């Protein structure tokens, strides 16, 4: 029987992305599923907290350490200059919620072109390893992140092409869908993290700028949705497919200039 779905077609790409979403949604429902998905939940927290830390560095501040707790929450601690303005503080606060969508969009885009499959996975594994050495300072993070990074590295190194591509799509959709996990948090002004009550990310933006935290929650969700939507649109479009040169007719002579 001939396959209905042509390899490399848009239908195959859509099917793989749908499969990635189904796996993410239904793994927790399986026996021991929560244990299987747990390391990847820690990874999404890493995306979020590293977003805070990298934004702090990009704005000229000092990223000190990253803490991840057993319940999947986390904190990125940065040292800010005394003259750090409100926009700097707001940018650092927004960097966390936006980071998973930025990473997810990048991985989805990389999954659309075979030349980027393994480099993207190696880059992610390397980033996890480097951040664990320099920034992660909690037992859960030190235990889980190296395992996840090693798994991603092995897939990039030894896995068949199909598995490498699916890993990118799975991780991309996992990062993108982590916004759903944080939905309630974004619409909360304060939260308890690691046993301490503190401003949520949107609460911190409200404190630094103007307008209520729920406005910033809506703005962050809209921005993330646009990024993920644009990446999916490109990944599923014909523009992401490498163009093959048209075959020349057999009766056409081809001449090549000789350069002395």
Image (cartoon, rainbow, N blue to C red):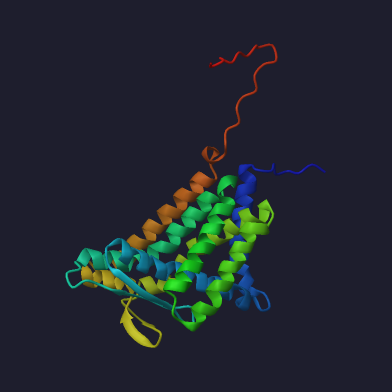
Q: How many marks?
A: 0
> Which quadrant is home to the N terminus?
top right
Residue at horizontal 37%, vertical 57%? 223
Check the image and name the residue furthest to the bottom: 195
| Rendered view: 108 above or below 154 | above
Q: Name the foreground residue: 162 vs 80.
A: 80
126 is higher (above) or lower (below) than 31: above
Residue at (46%, 51%) from the top-left corner? 229
Q: Of all residues shown, which one is farthest toward the front?
A: 260
Furthest residue in direction left, as rendered: 83
- Is residue 180 visible to the viewer in this orientation of the structure? no
- Give the x, y percent position of residue 153: 59, 62
Question: In the image, is 2 to the left or to the right of 210?
Answer: right
Q: Is residue 47 left or right of residue 23?
A: left
* Percent coordinates x, y for residue 257 in the rendering: 56, 14
Quarter occupied by residue 77: bottom left
Place of residue 152 in the rendered image (x, y in percent of width and height, measured from the top left): 59, 63
Say if 242 sits above or below 27 in the image.
above
């Amino acid at each position: 029987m001939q396959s209905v779905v042509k390899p490399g077609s848009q239908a195959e790409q859509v099917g793989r992305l749908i499969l990635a979403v189904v796996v993410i949604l239904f793994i927790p429902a399986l026996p021991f599923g929560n244990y299987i998905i747990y390391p990847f939940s820690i990874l999404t927290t890493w995306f979020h907290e590293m977003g805070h830390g990298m934004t702090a560095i990009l704005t000229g501040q000092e990223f000190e350490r990253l803490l991840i707790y057993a319940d999947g929450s986390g904190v990125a601690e940065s040292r800010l200059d005394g003259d750090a303005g409100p926009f700097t503080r707001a940018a650092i606060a927004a960097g966390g919620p936006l980071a998973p969508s930025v990473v997810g969009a990048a991985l989805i885009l990389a999954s659309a072109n075979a030349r980027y499959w393994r480099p993207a996975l190696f880059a992610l594994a390397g980033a996890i390893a480097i951040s664990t050495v320099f920034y992660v300072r909690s037992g859960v993070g030190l235990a889980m992140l190296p395992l996840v990074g090693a798994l991603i590295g092995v897939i990039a190194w030894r896995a068949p092409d199909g598995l490498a591509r699916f890993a990118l799509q799975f991780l991309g959709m996992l990062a993108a869908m982590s916004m759903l996990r944080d939905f309630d948090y974004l619409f909360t002004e304060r939260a308890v993290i690691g046993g301490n009550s503190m401003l949520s990310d949107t609460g911190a933006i409200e404190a630094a700028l103007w307008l209520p935290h729920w406005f910033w929650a809506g703005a962050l969700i809209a921005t993330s949705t646009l990024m993920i939507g644009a990446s999916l649109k490109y990944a599923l479009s014909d523009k992401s497919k490498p163009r093959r040169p048209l075959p020349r007719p057999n009766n056409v002579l081809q001449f090549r200039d000789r350069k002395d």
